[in-house]
Amino acid sequence: MLTRLLREYLRPYRRQVALVVVLMAAQSAGSLYLPNLNADIINYGVVTGNLHYIITTGTLMLGITLGLGAVAVVAVYFASRTAMGAGADMRAAVFGQVQAFSSRDMDRFGTPSLITRNTNDVQQVQLFVQMALTLMVVAPIMSIGGIVLAVREGAALSPLLAVAVPIMGVFIGSVVATVVPQFRKMQVKIDRINQVLREQVTGVRVIRAFVRNESEEGRFAKANADLTATALRVNRVFALALPALMAILNLSSVAVLWFGGRLVSDANMPIGNLTAFLNYIAQILMAVMMAVMMAILAPRAAASAERIKSVLDAAPAVTSPEKARRPERLNGLVRFEDVSFGYPGSEQPVLQDVSFTLEPGRTSAIVGGTGSGKTTLLNLIPRFFDVTGGKVLVNGVDVRDQELEELWASMGLVAQTAFLFSGTVASNLRFGQPEASDAELWRALRVAQAQEFVAAMPGALDARIDQGGTNVSGGQRQRLSIARALVTKPKLYLFDDCFSALDAATDARLRAALKAETTDASVLIVSQRVSTVMHADQIIVLDDGRVAGIGAHRELVASCAPYREIVVSQLGEEAAA
């Protein structure tokens, strides 16, 4: 999976990759050549007392060393640019894929996991790319070249390499096989840490209200300890690996000096060759150390690549059709024709045989008990979910046959949970219409009954809004969200229980202003409050996922028992009568 991911995202950087490979190969070749020159200085300069040869060869070695330093700087620069660029492309791809996910896809992966995949997982792959472009190129050249040149310098000592190198290889293989499963577990446990922390930050008021601080601290401590224990198991393996490799190196060096010293004393090997052989042994070990570093990074990068790829390869449950149909007129007309909907794996559908029409210039409302399917029904119009039976037509065309972005652009949605983005009041209001003028923003604020409190804020339209709108009240968030939808001036408005935080007087003023503003648009209001919907032109009553009645308030009070029960429970028998 890691190879597939890198092949895809390193393709735009293949020239830089090729340059880095060439530079690192040149650096490795130069590094392998230096011990040979050092041996020549000893054999032909020091032993014979030839000072000119020592100076000439030493100058050459100095020049090669300076050149290798310059090559290394350039190689690391381009390797870093390549790794950062590939990481940025991966993050953009994951972000774009998540933007295309439906609500069902978001639930399948989970928000904490998606955040971890687009940050920590991408970072692991990015780090691996940077190290691979340097170490992975150098390690094989240094190890193979070191072995060949070591044999060339001292063939009689080559059996020592035949023992030491395989032992190192087996040891590294064992380390990798041990830590790969642990790294996979670590990424999952990072997800869990992210999830717990996100819940505690988001629900801090609830935690304090119910005095659950110690309980939540314990839950976080448990997740933290679980991650720590896994990380410690991995680090213990590497803590044993490095001393073991050093022991192999040192024993190899001792063996070389033992047997090589005898060969030198018997005049069967020049002293310079023995020195070069020792240098090559050290270079081989350095190559092995590089392999160990890659062994540390590769398993975690492989686990991260699997998680990234699972997001990128996930087919969104809701997609635009290949041949989209464009409505002839954007009039806001919506028709439900025998619509049914059920979640995957559910025992019974949430909605069954739902049929009604939303007409331009009229306000429709959906009411019903908790769990009756009101929000689910509304979410079928912008196609956040696909119906499992029947069809939903917007502007005369089935929503499944329309381009998603064009469908969304034709309507103004105010969600059940009012959410504002960090920025200013103006930037939030212009979210759907970036070119809107200040006059259009103030008009939308007047209709949404938000002009007064926005004008009182420091900076008015330029007043700061914190992430999620946490620096304004719940009612103010709802009114700003309604104003944001009004700025786009669509032909279809969908209000999902977004008047719940408003007092009765503000609610009444807002509905009156909204009716005057949307005379040529279709308006659908989902609410649990009868006072919010009783003046609607058409009220659709849902009961256990079915339409129990459609009509005006007075008609439904007289003819629809579920609606009458809601009216009585909220307004009393006198109001129902």
Image (cartoon, helix red, strand yellow):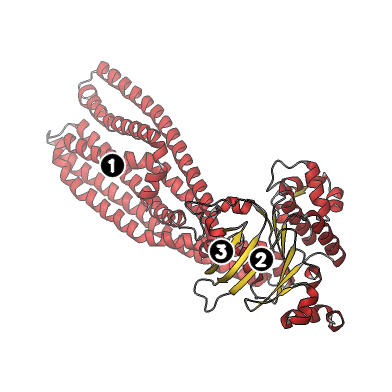
Pointer 1 and pointer 2: residues touching (CB < 8 Å)?
no
> What kind of element bears circle 3?
loop
Rendering coords of residue 29 (x, y %): 28, 31
Left or right? Give the position of 308 relative to 215. Answer: left
Which residue matches tag 1? 140
Vertical relation: 269 (above or below) 59: below
Q: Can residue 565 be seen in this snapshot?
A: no
Mark 1 to mark 3: distance in Å? Answer: 52 Å
Give the number of the disc on residue 171: none
The earlier-in-sequence mark between 2 and 3 is 2
Instruction: Residue at 61%, 67% (x, y): give it.
Output: 336
Residue 11 location, quadrant = top left
Q: Please state which of residues 346 and 140 is positioned toward the viewer in this rendering.
A: 346
**Residue at left 56%, top 71%?**
341
Viewer-side label of 1, 3: 3
Q: Amino acid at mark 1?
A: Pro
Look at discs 1 and 2 and give the one toward the viewer: 2
Viewer-proximal residue, 434 or 248?
Answer: 434
> Quick one: which residue is furthest to the front in this view?
328
Q: In this rendered view, identify the residue nearer to me: 393 or 413.
A: 393
Quadrant location, the C terminus: bottom right
Which is nearer the N-term, disc 1 or disc 2?
Answer: 1
Mark 1 burial class by Cα count in 10 Å: few <14, some 14-19, many 20+: some
Q: Viewed as shown, does residue 66 lie left or right of 476?
A: left
Q: Quadrant of residue 352?
A: bottom right
Which residue position is annotated with label 2? 357
The outermost residue toward the top is 52
Q: Residues within 10 Å of mark 3 (few under 14, many from 20)?
A: many
Check residue 385 in the rendering and tell me which mark sits there, or answer none: 3
